[in-house]
């Protein structure tokens, strides 16, 4: 097996790539051993005996699959979390989500005449004071106070 280091070096210069990206046809090694000038190498390149290997990039397949899983809500366990719970979802954001849901529920109940305006106003103020943890907690309090029938659904 002849030493083709010189041919590989010249081919790398002519192909404008690194020596590692130069492909030499294993079947034509004896023929390539005789190629000592640049013109010999050029003709070998033209004959496709010497070729430039394409750049191999990093595959995005695994990254896309992971991103799809994250979009579904996977990979969110304690081992994947950086930052405190309030850094991940700020206190104000949590408050806004909760109060908007409670106020929407109260408006819906008042609009469908399940609670009178006076009860609406009273519970609106209580919600503003942070009395209820959630919509369910608000409904529970309305039912316990007798302001909303037990079977009534919002």
Image (tube, helix red, strand yellow):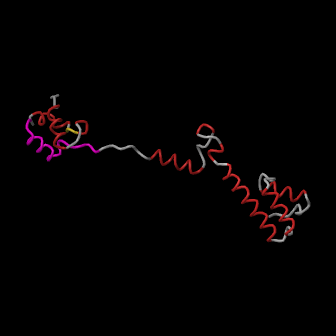
| Front-most of residues 82 and 126 | 126
Residue at (60% x, 40% y) in the render: 83
Q: Pinpoint residue 9: horizontal percent, then vertical percent.
A: 17, 35
In the rendered structure, the answer to whether residue 117 lies left or right of residue 62 reads right
Q: Pinpoint residue 48: horizontal percent, then vertical percent.
A: 17, 45
In the rendered structure, the answer to whether residue 51 lies left or right of residue 106 reads left
Visible in this render: residue 55? yes
Compared to residue 93, the image places residue 6 above or below, namely above
Q: Pinpoint residue 47: horizontal percent, then vertical percent.
A: 14, 46
Residue at (69% x, 56% y) in the render: 96
Visible in this render: residue 81? no
In the rendered structure, the answer to whether residue 132 lies left or right of residue 73 reads right
| Front-most of residues 130 and 7 | 130
Q: Quadrant of the N terminus?
A: top left
Compared to residue 66, the image places residue 139 above or below, namely below
- Determine if the magenta segment contains residue 19: no
Please state the extent of the stretch shown in magenta in the rendering. Answer: 36-54
Residue at (43% x, 47% y) in the render: 60
**Number of callouts:** 0
- Determine if the magenta segment contains residue 53: yes
Q: Quadrant of the C terminus?
A: bottom right
Residue at (72% x, 55% y) in the render: 98
Q: Pinpoint residue 13: horizontal percent, then vertical percent.
A: 17, 40
**Residue farthest to the right?**
146
In the rendered structure, the answer to whether residue 53 lies left or right of residue 91 reads left
Quadrant of the rendered image containing residue 149: bottom right
């Amino acid at each position: 097996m002849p030493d083709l280091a010189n041919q590989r070096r010249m081919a790398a210069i002519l192909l404008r790539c690194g020596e590692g990206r130069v492909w030499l046809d294993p079947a034509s090694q004896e023929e390539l051993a005789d190629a000592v000038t640049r013109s010999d190498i050029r003709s070998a390149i033209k004959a496709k005996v010497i070729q430039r290997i394409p750049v191999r990039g990093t595959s995005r397949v695994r990254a896309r699959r992971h991103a799809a899983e994250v979009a579904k809500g996977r990979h969110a366990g304690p081992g994947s979390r950086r930052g405190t719970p309030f850094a991940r979802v700020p206190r104000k954001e949590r408050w806004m989500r909760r109060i908007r849901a409670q106020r929407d529920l109260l408006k819906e109940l008042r609009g469908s005449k399940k609670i009178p305006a006076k009860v609406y106003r009273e519970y609106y103020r209580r919600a503003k004071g942070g009395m209820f943890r959630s919509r369910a907690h608000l409904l529970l309090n309305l039912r316990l106070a007798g302001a909303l029938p037990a079977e009534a659904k919002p």
